[in-house]
Amino acid sequence: MTVGIVMLCHTALHRAAQVARHWATQGCPVVIHLDRRVAEVDRAKLAAALSNLPDVRFSARIACDWGTFSLVQASITAATQMLRDFPGVGHVYLASGSCLPIRPVAELQAHLAAHPMTDFIESVTTADVGWTVGGLNKERFTLRFPFSWKKQRRLFDAYVALQRRLGLTRRIPQGIVPHLGSQWWCLTRASLQAILSHPDRARNDRYFRRVWIPDESYFQTLIRQVSSRVESRSLTLSKFDFQGRPHVFYDDHLHLLRRTDAFVARKIWSQADLLYDTYLSPTADQAPRLEPTPGKIDRLFAKAVERRLKGRPGLYMQSRFPTKARGGNRSAAPYGVFEGFADLFPDFHPWLARVADARVHGHLFAPGRVQFAGEERVFKGGLSDSVTLRDYNPRSFLTNLIWNSRGERQCFQFGPGDAQEIAPFLAGDPNASIMIVSGAFVIPLWQSGLPFAEIRAEAARLQKIEADFIELLNAPDTKARIRVWTLADLVEDRVEPLQQIVDWLNPRAPHRMTELPQMVDLTGFSAFLQELRNQGMQPVLMGDVPDTAGQPGAYPGLSRPQLAK
Amino acid sequence: MKRWAFCRAGAGCDEGRSRKALVFGMGLMSAYKLRLRRQYLLARAYRRGSQLKSVVNRMAGLRGQPILLFSTMRNERVRLPYFLDYYRKLGVDHFLIVDNASTDGTREYLLDQADVSLWSTDAGYKQSRFGMDWMMHLLRRHGVGNWCLTVDVDEFLVYPFCETRPLRALTDWLDSAGTRSFSSMILDMYPKGAMHEQPYREGQNPFDIAQYFDSGNYTISRNPTFRNLWIQGGPRARVFFADRPKKAPAMNKIPLVKWDPSYAYISSTHMMLPRGLNLTYETGGGEKPSGCLLHAKFLDTFALKAEEELQRGQHYAQSHEYRAYREGIAQERDLWCNWSEKYINWRQLEILGLMSKGNWA
């Protein structure tokens, strides 16, 4: 007993001829179904190329359209001829013209000889199918599909929707339990014979003529009626992408194909010379066999589909430009935004860099110059410290910065004196952790020694900006992680807020901080605030800063506070 | 209006959905204006086509669906050997080239190449929309139904798997996906040190000299009229246009298109009409496949070119770009910086997020 190959061909006929010759010369009869739309010249060429092989036959030609019964009809015609012409055939293997045997034919023959009664066909009930595209699985069997999915997509969709709304369904004939599976199967002579000469065959064919993509369901369903040993897997390696199109194999997949346990691969790019030369050469049998790891190939294609559907979060580029409406992360990685801390703690930068294990920038959105960490003129990726470039597109600037430094946590200072255009972006980004000491912006003013009138005006301006920012952050659609303390809170207890910064940015750090940054001496600060009030400005964001602030006194212990989320 | 209302490519046509939204979303009036604009561009290209004089046409022997390359050039003799060779290796079947009054032997060299068809013209480059009218004329006459690559002589296409898969593998795959256009943004390459320090020799890989690029300083916004992404950035924006970023050159390009008589390039190969062709990007978070055009502009030949172009005044926006370069060259000769990335291969560009494999595996 041997295996007979039924090949459905329509393009790249020179490759089909090569493959057919390979099968035939190794003792496998071949019946080729050639699409009727193939030009006569090409048919003649193919026939001539195979004319010296008595075991290669051609079946009656049918014009095949994707997704229609014509493909099933072509398979039936060719399989019938195979069973009739080659009594020595024990199994029939359905393949396409772009399939390539990737293991020695003898191994396939041995495998089938060891399982003479087994049908190798993927056959899964519709309820358990997860792969179908477009959400049609059970409905393939119960709706009508008079329109072509490829050429009349709108009509197709509209008619499906209409039938769903009106509740129109077809009755599934008695005895048929819909199953789906890969169209590339390998069936025993007995099973195939039983399907083809089934008493209900005419009825079944009539029914399946109106089923959508019957080549994935006809044999897969009927085999359950006639076979006692179905091994539900395809011997053909065939991967589909998210649109239901088969993935194509190229020369650079050779190392992957060597590691699969399938006997045939589909679909091979017709100009993949290396693959064809390797697997069809007479010495192909002698290539060292590697331990099969079919998972590798699955991963490769799963990753490709994920790349196409989900992409790399936080990346904005020529072929990925997620729009705001779709939500999700706007940036590539979590980052920290600090407002006011550096005003209160002069050595906040080095402290933060130590405890949070992060790259700590100054005010990235400062008006004069972008303050990259280490005062660099240019940062990773070629980001310039030019303010005009940054302000030309602040979002691109920030998303680039975060994307360019993947793998390293970024932190930067922000404040009411900075360009505020980025604020809505920060508020809407779940990756942003924004921590604010409200009102701290007056400390540098207080220390500046400027005329009081100027200080008062500037303090009022900055307070307005910071209040607007905090209001923005308090909006219900904010996605950033936010914590706001008043200056008075910090003066009262600086441990809890600082501990929280460490917990947020570096959760794996030791639970207790061993060092705290030094706070500026705030002696006389409350009098300054009072003076602001006396001059008619209301400093609301600072809270009630006590008179004794900043003087060395008893700190509450470095305890680990409860986190408020 | 028919072309706007129905997706001709049918199933698998990526642009189908968005075109539906387009018709209902923007109103028929503006669709009609775009149609008029497209027809104007087509008519213009047809008229300017008469400026082209065919020097040699060797297209008779082409069979099947050849991959064609279209280019306009002037005095590029020294670059030609490597350029032609690079694209031959990728699998370009035929070159259709317009020679704009070269005096350095460009024309004679091209005449000797068996896979080049040559046209010549002495007409103004600027008046021909910087050569685009000529290109579109040739695209319409010879490119219809084929995959057409429109590039300058200093642009080198890099696409996913380009080391192991020829261009034909890409176009076959795009065909099967129903995609009609392929985006490849310009990536400016530059040497370390001043441009004149390492002179370019004929036949040499320009990226042996210009090895560096900026990996992550590109700004992107969406053009609401044409729906394309407008990308700016790179060393040119960083060094030459830091104080007027709006004027920085556009980096987005759509050089590879399966041509149809109704298509038109609007501004260089930056964007197209019908504008569904510009939707080479995914807005739902996924990534479509894309490539890069490595730009070998910043070589020792550049200073010479800048001077010549300024004299002729034949370049984009009153040679604004070249003027900026000349000033920039005078002040800061070195485009290289500490964070410049050294080019390795397409996988590196993919990892850096400058291009994408999409779902091509």
Image: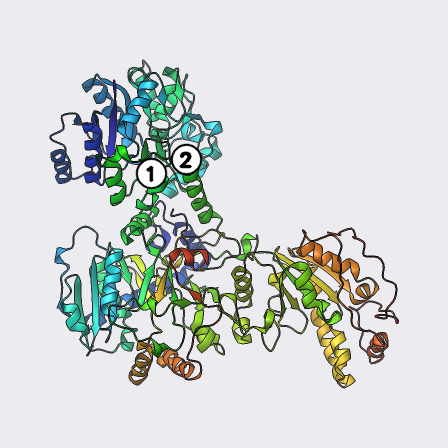
Q: Circle 2 is placed at which residue position?
A: A294
- Side of A272 where A440 appears, left or right: right
Give the residue at mark 1. A148
- Label 2 sits on what residue type? Pro
Instruction: State the separation of the CA atoms marked 2 and 1.
Output: 35 Å
The residue furthest top is A199
Relative to A125, say whether B246 is above or below: below
Mark 2: few, some, or many residues within 10 Å (few <14, many ≥20)? some
* Frontmost residue, A525 versus A484: A525
Q: In this rendering, is residue A149 above or below B348?
A: above
Where is B162 relative to A66, above or below? below
Residue under mark 1: which chain is it in? A
The amino acid pointed to by label 1 is Ser
Residue located 73% across and 56% down the image: A500
User: What colouring does the structure picture have?
Assistant: rainbow
Q: Quadrant of the N terminus of chain B?
A: bottom left
